[in-house]
Image: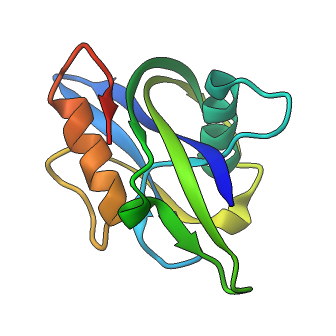
Amino acid sequence: MIRLSVSALVWRVRGASRELLLMQRSDNGHWGIPGGYVEPGENVHTAAAREVHEETGVRCRVGRLVGVYSDPSTQVIAYPDGNRVQSVNLCFEAEALGQDEPTTPEETLAVAWRAADDLPEPFVPIQQMRLRDALAGEREAWVR
């Protein structure tokens, strides 16, 4: 099965530094960026903002497309029930606007704001590429 997913590198500015929104996943304890599947009838910008808000409580404005990630060697998820899903992920950059309570707290163990060069471990490996791509500052979206 193939499913469309979104993720967002949400930034906020604190003084002279820029911080990235991170979440610690409840399913494996790894740190990463918020994201999830696009729901029927939903556009990708709305889906990315919804996923960020659900998992972290942060409201955001979704901006540029960082990249499209579909390589089966990194984008196939094996679920405990035996199903395997190839996720085609659209990763966006976003700007933090405010904070509410998360609506799916069971998906998240912790939320943190960190500098891009100070990521907690363990960090979701496939999301490290998305962050590197965003930091490269290319105008065109990456396709990987």
Q: Is residue 114 above or below residue 31?
A: above
**Residue 117 in picture, x, y percent from top left:** 14, 48
Q: Quadrant of residue 85?
A: bottom right
Image mark count: 0
Asked if residue 130 can be seen in this view, the reply is: yes
Question: Is 116 on the left-hand or right-hand side of 50?
Answer: left
Residues 49 and 71: in front is 71
Q: How is the image coloured?
A: rainbow
Residue 18 horizontal side relative to residue 50, left or right:
left
In this rendering, the answer to whether 43 lies above or below 73 is: above
At a point 66% along the width and 65% down the height, the residue shown is 107
> Can residue 99 be seen by looking at this rendering?
no
Q: Residue 109 location in percent, x, y? A: 56, 69
Residue lying farthest to the top in this orientation: 139
Residue 110, x across and y down, in percent: 51, 63
Spot occupied by residue 71 in the image (x, y as percentages of width and height): 39, 53
Q: Residue at x 60, y 40 (%)?
A: 52
Q: Using the image as rendered, state which of residue 24 and residue 70 is in the foreground.
A: 70
Name which residue lies at 56% across and 59% down.
Answer: 86
Position of 125 relative to 50 (above/below): below
Task: Give the quarter of the figure containing the N terminus.
Answer: bottom right
Q: Toward which corner of the image does residue 72 lie, by quadrant? A: bottom left
The image quadrant where one finds the C terminus is top left
Identify whether 106 is placed above or below 139.
Answer: below
- At x 34% / y 40%, what residue is drawn? 20
